[in-house]
Image: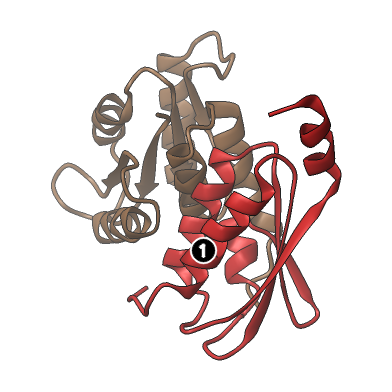
Amino acid sequence: MSANSEARHAIDAVVRVVVLPKHLHARPAGQLAQLAARHPSTAIELVAGQRRANARSVLAVMGLGAVSGGEVQVVVAGPDAATVADEVVEILQSPETDG
Amino acid sequence: MVGIVLISHSSGLAEGAAELVGQIAAGTRVVPAGGTDDGRLGTSTDRIAAAIAAADTGDGVLLIPDLGSSVLSALALLADLDPRANGERIRLADAPFVEGAVAAAVAASGGLDLTAVASAAEEARDVRKL
């Protein structure tokens, strides 16, 4: 990757919108926080209604109170933003689990 | 990976919290230390010391106590196990028990160091549930 594309990634934010097939509860919140921990230089923010949460904080994500059928906006900025955004969307869209 | 010891007066509470945390942050080493040696409510420094040994993989151990004498027992043990009290190998978190354990375990599973895992636990105090 060239220095130019690195610089562009650092300022561009990737935005995705997901309609949740399940509540955004403990287990997916944990998966999101683990993903965020693997990408320490990438900012991952979730927006649900008036609330925003940094995906790094499993408790803040649970505190969004985002429920099945609700819309969540995913905003990712930093290295590998598009790839990371895809992974976030995959976690949010994976089928119902307990917990 | 940083290990986590959950210290409670109740073995059921410590074990249940560890089970819940294991569901949310799979692969973390979370060891419960609850109750007395003879199965009553209370805290046992022997049980806590054994749990610390079981949780320690070389990257440090975070202790999360529930209330009262759990905190005092952990402090007494810390003075023995970490006389230099530099927080490099073992730390005591000032955090809510369940939320702190979940946040710490997720941070540990992401490979963060003991300082960052302790911060994750303590930040749990400021996160609204509703």
| Residue drawn where x is 25% and y is 54% of the image | B11
Residue at position x 41%, y 35% in the image: B73
Within 10 Å of the Cα at label 1, are there few (<14), some (14-19), or many (20+) other Cα atoms? many
Question: Is residue A56 something that shows in the picture?
Answer: no
Viewer-nearest residue: B106 or A84: A84
Q: Secondary structure at mark 1?
A: helix
Give x and y (percent) for residue B19: 28, 57
Decide: is A85 above or below B111. Answer: below
Residue B90 image position (x, y, % from top left): 47, 23
Is residue A40 in view?
Answer: yes
Q: Residue at x 61, y 81 (%)?
A: A66
Dividing the picture into quadrants, the one containing residue A19 is: bottom right
How many tags in the picture?
Answer: 1
Question: Can you tell which quarter of the image residue B105 is in?
Answer: top left
Which chain is brown in the picture?
B
Q: Residue furthest bottom?
A: A69
**How is the structure coloured here?**
by chain
Residue of label 1 = A29
Name the quarter where the C terminus of chain B is drawn. Answer: bottom right
Q: Which chain is red?
A: A
| Amino acid found under the numbered disc labelled 1 | Ala
Q: Chain of mark 1?
A: A
Q: Position of residue A89 (x, y in %)?
A: 55, 66
Where is the N terminus of chain B found, in terms of image quarters? top left
Where residue A16 sits, quadrant-wise, is bottom right
Q: Residue at x 37, y 77 (%)?
A: A95
Q: Nearer the viewer, residue B23 or B76?
A: B23
Residue B12: x and y in percent read: 25, 60
Query: In front here: B55 or B1?
Result: B1
